[in-house]
Amino acid sequence: EVQLVESGGGLVQPGRSMKLSCAASGFTFNNYDMAWVCQAPKKGLEWVATISYDGSSTYYRDSVKGRFTISRDNAKSTLYLQMDSLRSEDTATYYCARHTSANPFAYWGQGTLVTVSS
Amino acid sequence: DIQMTQSPPSLSASLGDKVTITCQASQNINKYIAWYQQKPGKAPRQLIRYTSTLVSGTPSRFSGSGSGRDYSFSISNVESEDIASYYCLQYDNLPYTFGAGTKLELK
């Protein structure tokens, strides 16, 4: 069974940093691209970033380019999202998702809430 | 960026009804649209990919169709477990973009 478990969310002040993790199990992690998708409170879904199966390629939405870094450790079957220079508008639940170009966001974790506030 | 215009924002249905949600893309997305169901407090769940392919575990009362810029998602014989929000996603081009969502409620 595919399982994705996010961690690392919480309350953080504007301008500070936070690192999210997503532990994967139930599939061969290094065979799949992975992604982060966020959802602001009571709002819709937004794609944040994608990383290729081997970590060689990364893609970001414009609003997080230069502030967020997606990475992975295939030996640990873990996906990361380093979030720097956080803004109030980054407040959201962040989901990790297993992704391929043919089957987008096929599996999701339960999400972790990031609240950016002073 | 490709904009996905999803309608209606909300929908009220009785058990057994057929409901339809539409998504219009700002450009041709070559059938690269997926549909997701999200229940309150839960993660989204993929139901359909590539316009009309039901993913494993999706009941046959769900269906999708469309081409070019215009796509639709239907639930025939709405059941109580279908009460949720539904989102379309275009994955033809980065940045991938979702529709704003449709909240399905019981009449």
Image: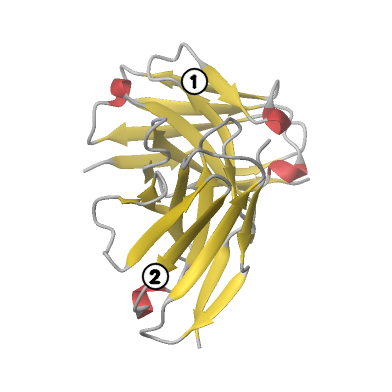
Give the image location of residue A19, x and y in percent. Answer: 56, 30
User: How many neighbours does mark 1 have within 10 angstroms: few (below 14), some (14-19), or many (20 or more)?
Assistant: many
Residue at 36 percent across and 42 percent down: it is A106
* Residue occupying image coordinates x 31% and y 20%: A30
Residue visible at 51% across and 27% down in the picture: A50
Look at discs 1 and 2 and give the one toward the viewer.
2
Q: Chain of mark 1?
A: A
Image x and y of residue A68, in percent: 64, 26
Work out whether B85 lies above or below A84.
below
For mark 2, name the chain.
B
Q: Secondary structure at mark 2?
A: strand
Q: Position of residue B30 (x, y in %)?
A: 50, 38
Q: Amino acid at mark 1?
A: Ser
- Using the image, determine if residue A69 lies above or below residue A105: above
Using the rendered image of the protein, determine whether residue B43 is visible from the camera's viewpoint. no
From the viewer's perspective, is residue A19 above or below residue A87?
A: above
Name the side, left or right, on which B102 lies relative to A79: right
Name the residue located 58 percent from the left edge and 47 percent from the top edge. Answer: B69
Q: Secondary structure at mark 1?
A: strand
Q: Which residue was labeled with disc 1?
A: A71
Mark 2 lies on residue: B75
Image side of residue A77 versus residue A60, left or right = left
Q: CA distance from mark 1 to mark 2?
A: 38 Å
Quick check: A35 above or below B21?
A: above
